[in-house]
Amino acid sequence: MYLSGYYEFCCRVKMIAGHDALEKIPGALAQLHAGRPLIITDKGVSGAGLVDTVVDAIKDGIDIGAMADDVPQDSSVKVVNHLADVYRDNNCDSIVAVGGGSVMDTAKGVNIVVSENADDLMKFSGVGVLKKALKPLLVIPTTSGTGSEVTLAAVIKDHERHLKMAFASYFLLPDVAILDSRMTLTLPPFLTASTAMDAMAHAVEAYTGLAKNPMSDANAIAAISLISSNLLNVIKTPSDREGRLALANGATLAGAAFSNSLVGVVHALGHATGSVCGVPHGVCMSILLPYGLEYNMHKRAHFTGELLLPLAGAEVYVGTPKHLRAEGTVAYIRKMNQNMHDATDGRHARFFEEVKDRDGRRMVPREKLEDIAEAALDDGSIVYNPEECDYEDFLMIIRAAWEGAPLDRSLIKGV
Amino acid sequence: MDDFKEITAGNKPFKKAYVAIMLWFVGRAIQAAARVDKDVKKEFEKLPDGFTFCLGVLPRGPYMIVGKNEKGRVKYMGWKPDGKRIDLDMKIKNIEAAILMFTFQESTAAASARNRMIVDGEVPYVCAIVRVLDIGEVYLLPKFIARLAVKRYPAWSFGRKYIGRVRIYFRSILGY
Ligand SMILES: [Fe+2]
């Protein structure tokens, strides 16, 4: 096991996980001396009936202050400030967020405004601005992917000023995260695939990145094992409750790993592809993960090779000679993508050329690859990547990932 | 006298003095590299005019400030952040961590991975300045040390590396 000379790790989120975890919410709130939450969610989540499930599970034990289901796809400052008013008008004393990454980021933003008794979120961006604990925040993820339920960051957009504001503080960590299999049962297979591969990328990049440490490694290994051994089953049998709960646990474990050890080139290029072409984050992660591992392999072969154990299991690991394990890891992830592609009738994309939007149009035109490489240079994730990444490096990776050809590792600078 | 207090006060005057000298040199070298090196020039061109960057050690210095003036020229702006508007603030958490970095026992990347720094500012600025600092290190340090400080030692032409190095040393010392 690798021991980094010095590290910091913090994940003080209480976990409540199970097939009947929702019913424990009133008790968890009472422990935090709260009992009148504002429920924050979005139209998609409430339309799928998930909020009803939550309300049914808690309404006898608790007095719901208000419910807001108007969080947009992208978090925004305006919505945060508006929801803070809703919180105050209804005398709420805590927040329950039900949804994916943008709902949770919004809830974190609202929590800043109401706890600091402010009128505008924008006064609180930057490091070290928050000085005291915020109101109780419970989060219930409805995708198994982002890991936002255990991260200390929130990204909120200021649409008027075209800014993406980042907030980071240990005070933004939710108090309680609730994983309940009922919350992800209806997630369609192709979304289950891409969101789970986002979580996979969190765990893999945390494990192979510069900031790895024993605590995040343990979380990452457990995450990879749970996701790898359950993902294809769940895609083929969406009603598999055990499998759903396993994926939810895997995503949270991966979140704890990357929240502390951060991510690398896969996320740098993924964020850039998302902002230039609008490709969903999980789709970018599925496609780019094997390429990121190939790109870093000359520096991280040992750690990459170790991942074959949680990915493929003991038999495959022992049966693969040591010097072939890193490549085995990459091949295994490619095979996962292929299997998910087959199991979703081709909806799970394997390379960028085949990524289509809802109307069947190609989302990543080849002429955009230069823009993507340029945008990746501004992404903070590269700081923690083991190998340097300049414009040419990014371009080489994104071109290969567009075509679907493995990276020609002999072309990597410094190899 | 105030100017010198930061360096001599406290209980680790020699370490602070060493880091102060290194910071002074790095600051002047960035100013020089912005004139001499095409990549550093390009990084600064992308930053807004009036941009300022502070690198220093908590709790009380030393610091160095580099910025771009209204005319777009990159300048070393001294060791006192007081009263200056800082766009990107990078603070090493304590003098021991600064010593590790400036004696090149720990690379910039490892230092950030180990949470040695508190960074306040927009992420694209951070990325640009980290690249500038890396290029600066390649110019200032002999290869066997710089290799420890940066992730990938670049394959530069003879002219860029050696002639550039001489020009940057001269300019740093003379301050133009
Ligand atoms: Fe991600």
Image (cartoon, coloured by chain):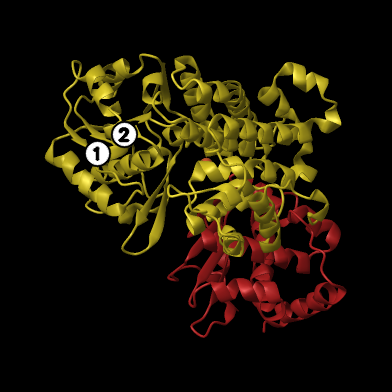
Q: Is residue A40 visible?
A: yes
Query: Residue sitting at 34 percent across and 48 percent down?
Result: A75
Query: Residue sitting at 40 percent across and 26 percent down?
Result: A184
- Above or below residue B120? Residue A69 is above
Same chain? Circles 1 and 2: yes
Q: Write down the colour of chain B.
A: red
The Cα atoms of the two marked residues, 1 and 2, are separated by 8 Å
Residue corresponding to mark 1 = A69
- Above or below residue A119? Residue A14 is above
Q: Write down the colour of chain A.
A: yellow
Q: Nearer the viewer, residue A375 or A112?
A: A375
Q: Are marks 1 and 2 in contact (CB under 8 Å)?
A: yes
Three-letter code for the amino acid on which mark 2 is drawn: Val
A58 relative to A263 in the view: left or right: left
What is the x, y in percent for residue B119? Answer: 52, 54
Residue corresponding to mark 2 = A45
Label 1 crowd (10 A; few <14 / some 14-19 / many >=20): some
The answer for which chain carries disc 2 is A
* Label 1 vs 2, first from the N-terminus: 2
Callout 2: CB less than 8 Å from ligand 1: no
Residue A47, by quadrant, is top left
Q: Nearer the viewer, residue A28 or A264?
A: A264
Q: Secondary structure at mark 1?
A: loop
Mark number, residue B18:
none
What is the x, y in percent for residue A262? Answer: 57, 42
What is the x, y in percent for residue B71? Answer: 52, 85
Three-letter code for the amino acid on which mark 1 is drawn: Asp
Locate the C terminus of chain B by quadrant.
bottom right
Query: Residue sitting at 71 percent across and 52 percent down?
Result: B107
What is the x, y in percent for residue B40? Answer: 66, 72
Locate the N terminus of chain B by quadrant.
bottom right
